Amino acid sequence: MGLVLKYGVSMLVYISILMLIVDIMRKKYRFSSWFWAATLLTFPLWIMTGGVSGWFRWVKILSVILPTIVLGFGRVANADNKIGGIWSFLRKNWMLWFLYGILFLNITEATIKDLQMGNFYNALAGIILCITIPYAPKYWNIENKNNGDLLVYTTIMWNFLYTTWNMAFVYAEGATFFASSICILLAAEVYPIIKGRPELYVIARVYTLATHLLIRAIVPELFPKIMNSSTWFNPDVMKYWGIANAVIALPFVFWHTWQLHTGKAEQSFRRIKAV
């Protein structure tokens, strides 16, 4: 009971902190842009602490932190309606395609790793996630008002599949960090629900993942100390979890394709009730 309480409290606290960070990064968009640019100054610590090692970890952190910086200044350009030079460049549609590509890359990296680990069913779910990302720029937008929020009209099932697929991947790839990874995934799921704006899922995912990877890079021993979940690993669970994700993914890809084919995607992706 004491162990359950320990994990429960630490995970709830971390989820709450992550959602607070997302809220700050959304509302203080100018601060956010410079904060993430400044995180590059911690690069030497990534090496000194050993927090980033191996090709997957290096590709992972760079493919998250660098695009987060680009997104930050893109949000400033749009929210403040900046014109001229680099600002006008950041407001063009290439930005949405770039962010779409980064999400695609993020999933692909893990899918390749899944294949290397022999998690073929979970890898299939990853491939389907790539195929079913809503197209840019039609279903992607950076608001030119308020906070310059990144809005992505992913479906409820896509969000759910991404979450369970990613959890299964982390469970197999690094069970030690599984509990903390659950936190960043749930924070990204819960935040848009609390706000009543499901289109905020991707921006919440961006900031929770970037925060988590930065902490792991600078203080790699933190999560193994406070929520080490290495003992949770079971190869049978890993196998059947991957199968379950594939079973969910297969009908979903047909539903997704049908929405596009019948022209219903505009309503179903944006959650607009047909009249």
Image (cartoon, rainbow, N blue to C red):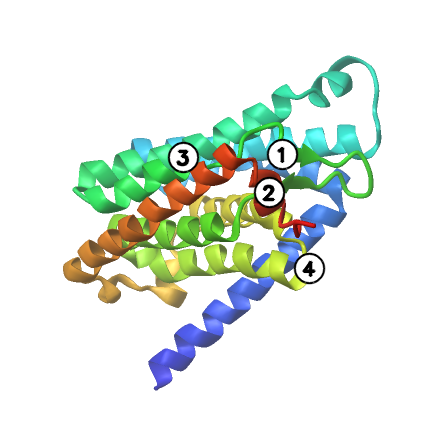
- Circles 1 and 2 in contact, beta carbons < 8 Å: yes
Measured as percent of width and height from the top left, residue 9 is found at 48, 75
Q: Residue at x 77, y 43 (%)?
A: 147
Measured as percent of width and height from the top left, residue 46 is found at 43, 38
Q: Crowding at label 3, few (<14), some or many (≥20) Cα neighbours within 10 Å?
A: many
Question: In the figure, residue 137 lies in which quadrant?
Answer: top right
Q: Which mark is residue 130?
A: 3
Rendered position, 46 above or below 181: above
Q: Which residue is mark 2?
A: 153
Q: Which mark is residue 48?
A: none
Q: Mark 2: which secondary structure?
A: loop
Q: Mark 3: which secondary structure?
A: helix
Q: Earlier in the sequence, mark 4 or mark 1?
A: 1
Q: Which mark is residue 140?
A: 1
Q: Residue at x 83, y 24 (%)?
A: 82
Q: Crowding at label 1, few (<14), some or many (≥20) Cα neighbours within 10 Å?
A: many
Q: Crowding at label 2, few (<14), some or many (≥20) Cα neighbours within 10 Å?
A: many
Q: Residue at x 46, y 47 (%)?
A: 158
Q: Label 4 amino acid?
A: Lys
Cα separation between marks 4 and 2: 15 Å
Cα separation between marks 1 and 3: 15 Å
Q: Earlier in the sequence, mark 4 or mark 3?
A: 3
Q: Earlier in the sequence, mark 3 or mark 2?
A: 3
Measured as percent of width and height from the top left, residue 269 is found at 57, 44
Cα separation between marks 1 and 2: 7 Å
Question: In the figure, residue 130 lies in which quadrant?
Answer: top left
Cα separation between marks 3 and 2: 15 Å
Cα separation between marks 4 and 3: 26 Å
Is residue 142 shown left or right of residue 108?
right
Q: Earlier in the sequence, mark 1 or mark 3?
A: 3
